[in-house]
Amino acid sequence: MRDNIAAGNWKMNTTIAEGTALAAGLRKTHPKSCDKVILCVPYTHLSAVATELDGQGMISLAAQNLSSEESGAYTGEISARMLADTGAEYVLVGHSERRTLFNEDSSILSKKIDQALSHGLKVIYCLGEPLDIREANQHNAHVKAQLQDDLFHLSADQMQQVIVAYEPIWAIGTGKTATPDQAQEIHAYIRSIIQDKYDPNTASQTSILYGGSVKPANAKELFAKPDVDGGLVGGASLKVDSFSAICESFGS
Ligand code: PGA
């Protein structure tokens, strides 16, 4: 069966010293109920956090972004090959902050996904609707179009390397969380779309995380839903106590 995953997205926060201390603190906790913990850290922290984690245990490392290009004259960009070289195993693609603040559309996102996979990085693919789309009850059509445009050029084999993170934009950093029922409904829908495109096995193997104001106080209820396989956590992943409590929020 698919993994239960707690992923922390540090965004543009922490110094290298603060980040390695956070990773060291998390390393000392041994969450029993969760299959995998992933830390999505700033580029500058990857090597130091990789050294801190030492390739041991259940904590994996992710980058928050990558270039859509292979190599060459792209000043300031970081390639998939460079990321793999740091010890990162995963990379976030399609986060709503990248889509809205940096104008990343499906033509860029699909190239980023291909770059990641071709260099052996697994992808945490984010999608989700803005508030007006939710209020117009168009959220299912919105996420279906995102999947089709960004992700569905992949083969079923490549899909094994992808974790999906549903993050309604209206819930990110707002303190407003989707209810567990809202999350379950759209996660089940996303899984059904994956099944329609691929097959039942691919759909049931794909971990689908919920993101948007996940906290220790709401994680248990969200993760109890059958199609919610964990969380992508922003603010609450910046403290050992709150993130380790979220990591312990699976099961009964
Ligand atoms: P948040 O962020 O938990 O602070 O809402 C989630 C995310 O953007 O991944």
Image (tube, helix red, strand yellow):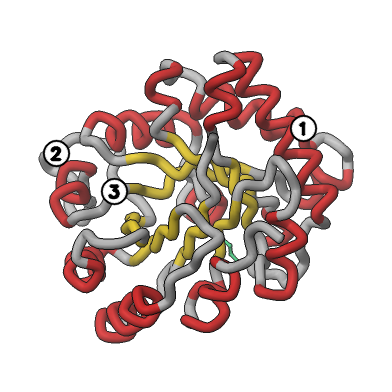
Q: Tag 2: Cα neighbours inside 10 Å, few (<14), some, or many (≥20)?
A: few
Q: Is residue 206 left or right of residue 51?
A: right
Q: CA distance from mark 3 to mark 2?
A: 19 Å
Q: CA distance from mark 1 to mark 2?
A: 36 Å
Q: Is residue 168 left or right of residue 126?
A: right
Q: Quadrant of residue 74?
A: top left
Query: Which secondary structure lies at badge 3?
Result: loop
For the residue with label 2, is its CB less than 8 Å from the closest atom of ligand 1?
A: no
In x, y percent, where is residue 249? 64, 65
> Which kind of residue does numbered mark 2 sit on?
Ser
Residue 89 bears which disc, if any? 3
> Which kind of residue does numbered mark 1 sit on?
Asn
Query: Which secondary structure lies at badge 1?
Result: helix
Image quarter for ligand 1? bottom right
Residue 71 bears which disc, if any? 2
Q: Which residue is most to the right?
A: 136
Q: Is residue 237 left or right of residue 79?
A: right
Residue at image location 30% in from the left, 37% down from the top: 116
In x, y percent, where is residue 5? 51, 53
Residue 140 bears which disc, if any? 1
* Residue depth check, mark 3 versus mark 2: number of the one nearer the observer: 3
Q: Give whichever of discs 1 and 2 has the lower sequence position.
A: 2
Q: Tag 1: Cα neighbours inside 10 Å, few (<14), some, or many (≥20)?
A: some
Residue at image location 13% in from the left, 50% down from the top: 85
For the residue with label 1, is its CB less than 8 Å from the closest atom of ligand 1?
A: no
Residue at image location 69% in from the left, 40% down from the top: 227
Image quarter of the C terminus: bottom right
Q: Give whichever of discs 3 and 2 has the lower sequence position.
A: 2
Query: Which secondary structure lies at badge 2?
Result: loop
Q: Give whichever of discs 3 and 1 has the lower sequence position.
A: 3
> Which kind of residue does numbered mark 3 sit on?
Glu
